[in-house]
Structure formats: structure tokens, C-alpha cells
Image: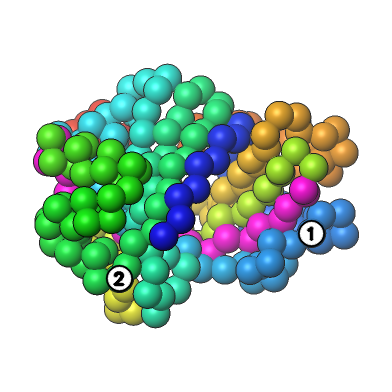
Amino acid sequence: MSNLIIKRNELKYYISNIEYHHLVNKLKHILKSDRYSTPHKGYFIRSLYFDSFDDECLYEKQSGDIFRAKYRMRIYDTKSDIVKFEIKNKANNQIFKESATISKKSAYRIIDGDYSELLTYNNPILNKIYIKFTTKNYRPKVIIDYIRDAFIFDFFNIRVTFDKDLHSCNSDFDIFSDNLHSIPCILEGKQILEIKYNMVLPEFIHKSLQLDSFERMAISKYTLGRRFFKIEKWEDN
């Protein structure tokens, strides 16, 4: 089992379907496609988000806390035997991801509330998750599915991604299910453009993406996934 720690700056924008196709047609001649991605097709991502009994992750996002974190399991294939367990920390525009891998069997046990399974790996990241989950009574909250079209530029470790067709499900937390009853998260015919980079975003990429024509947004897939299952009025924000 390997751990992965990543620090990057992150920018997010809503774009239209037409803008998505236009930008992909540009980028496929300028940047390399991610090895798992084919332009205009992309690859599947599914995340299962956990939150406390009082929804502290959701509240931190909605209240605009400078320092906040989310906890999620992630797979790229429902037939996978390996699950990525992540803590996504954020401070202003910078993200700091801590990631460890667990087995499918362990994932099911954790989803069922057996958090002692995390300790069997003797892993510092999973130990941190165990402490958080047990002290704050974390539980599965929502599954988010989407398709990602990704491009990379090795210099400055840049990734440009287009996340489309977001769907959510909060009635079934079987991350490996092929029969989730999910609903669309975005009803306005938009997709999500994300740019991640270590230090500097080169000018040629900035211009190619026409970023000055888009409004930067504080977009959270977790928040979008919970928008139709809100309990309090503040969750509309």
C-alpha cells in the first residue's frame, strides 16, 4: 500500500457545453491527454463522501472557512479491488491531498461503520481518518459520479480537467454498485473546468483556456451533490 501527498493551487470555473467542446478541441493540439483519458470521452470517477453527524465539512465549505477538509473514498471502475481513501485539505486556493489505498473488503467494512478496519493498515493517513471519524461520528453522506476529460503539462505539474455529467446518490452508499439511482447535480447545462498547478500557470495555457472570459467560482462537487438533499436553508448558498 502506498501513500500519496500532493500540494497544488486550484482554480475552478463553470463553462457551457459549447465552451467545453471548443476548449477540448484546442487543448488536444497543445497539451497531452491524461493516459486514462480520450478527448471528448474522458474516464469515470466515483467518490463517496463522509461527513460528521452535524455536517461539519459541508458547513465549513458553506461558511467560507479558509482552512477546511473533505474525506472521501474514490474509485475509477466499479469492478476495482482497490479504493483510494483521501483527505482533501484546502487553504485558500491551495489544495493538499493525502491519499492511501485500501481493499474493496476494507471499504465495505468502513462504509458499514467499522472504522477499526482503518487501524489494521498501520498507516498514518488512515490513522488520522480513524481519529476524525470516531471522534466526530462520521458517516457516508453522498456518492458523486462524473466523467473527467483531462490534459497534462509536465512543467509545473499542470492538470487541466473538464468534469461533466455530475450525478449524485444519497440513498445507497455501495460505491461498487452498477445500479445506483442517481440524479443530475447541475441542471443548467454546464460543466466544470479545473486547473491545478504547482507554482505558475503559463501564459499560453491561460490564453488558450480564455480564462479571462470566465468567472472563477468556489465549486464543490460535494456541496453540489447535497444540494437537493439539504436540511437547513443555509445549504442553498
Question: Which mark lies nearer to you, 2 or 1?
Answer: 2
Residue 16, horizontal then vertical, whole percent? 63, 51
At horizontal 56% and vertical 35% (from top left) the residue drawn is 7
Instruction: Give the main secondary structure of the magenta stretch.
Output: strand
Res 121 seen here: yes
User: Disc number at residue 104?
Assistant: 2
Residue 78, horizontal then vertical, whole percent? 39, 75
Q: Secondary structure at mark 2?
A: helix
At horizontal 39% and vertical 69% (from top left) the residue drawn is 82
Relative side of 105 to 155, left or right = left
Q: Is residue 12 magenta?
A: no
Label 2 Cα neighbours within 10 Å, binned few <14 / some 14-19 / many ≥20: some
Q: For this rendering, which residue is in front, 113 or 144?
A: 113
> Can you tell which quarter of the image residue 14 is in?
top right
Q: Secondary structure at mark 1?
A: strand
* Location of residue 60 with respect to 26 vertically, above or below: above
Q: For this rendering, which residue is in front, 75 or 59?
A: 75
Task: Determine whether label 2 and label 1 are within 8 Å by CB.
Answer: no
Q: For this rendering, which residue is in front, 6 or 217?
A: 6
- The residue tagged 1 is 32
Res 182 seen here: no
Relative side of 56 to 136, left or right = right
Question: Which residues fall within the magenta stretch?
Answer: 136-154
